[in-house]
Image: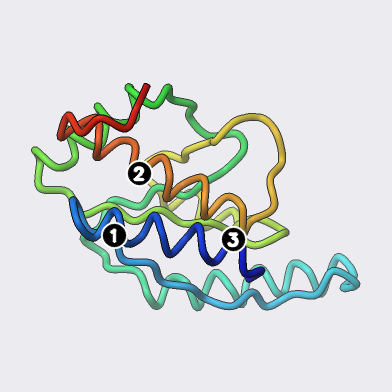
Amino acid sequence: MPAPLRTLCEEYQHRLQRIGGVTLSEVAEARRSSAGEAERLQGLQFEAQRLRERLDQTTLLIPLYIGGRNFSSEAFAGEMQRWRDDGERVTFMIGGPDGLHPELLRMGSWSLSLGPMTFPHLLVRVLLLEQLYRAYTLMERIPYHR
């Protein structure tokens, strides 16, 4: 990960640890940009298997997907509050450059979209961490969101 993105991820992880706690787990992608379609699909399947092996079956799985549900920051904080009140353990899953295997999308309770634009998967990590932090600050009434 490029240093500026790594620094941002670490900053938001540090902030989240102070108020709510987030664990970040990474599975290295299994594909190369020069791979053909068959190799790309095989890589997605291999990655899906590795991700399934790491999933806790009791977690509420929310894959990130461009066709998923959109929320305002306030509405997302409301979802986070509901999950916390219900005692849910939530896992967000970000795919690599080729996205997530359709099986993983079907495993999710629903999917989350950060908007209709395409973002680099490393930048999506930063955006998700920032939105998680923003949601926690809204829930705790910490002056960050404006």
**In which quadrant is the C terminus drawn?**
top left
Residue 52: assigned label? none
Mark 1 sits on what residue?
22
| Percent of width and height locating residue 30 | 68, 78
Mark 2 sits on what residue?
132
Q: Residue at x 48, y 29 (%)?
A: 69
Name of the residue lying farthest toward the front: 143
Task: Name the amino acid type tagged 1.
Answer: Val
Task: Name the amino acid type tagged 2.
Answer: Leu
| Percent of width and height locating residue 105 | 51, 50
**In which quadrant is the N terminus drawn?**
bottom right
The answer to whether marks 1 and 2 mark residues whose Cβ atoms lie closer than 8 Å is: yes
Q: Is residue 44 above or below residue 82?
A: below
Please give left or right for residue 82 compared with residue 28 in the image. Answer: left
Q: Residue at x 9, y 38 (%)?
A: 85
Whichever of labels 1 and 2 marks the residue nearer the N terminus, that label is 1
**Quadrant in which residue 100 is drawn:** bottom right
Crowd band around label 3 with a 10 angstrom C-alpha radius: few (<14), some (14–19), many (20+): some
**Quadrant in which residue 116 is drawn:** top right
Element marked by disc 1: loop
| Percent of width and height locating residue 104 | 50, 57
Whichever of labels 3 and 1 marks the residue nearer the N terminus, that label is 3
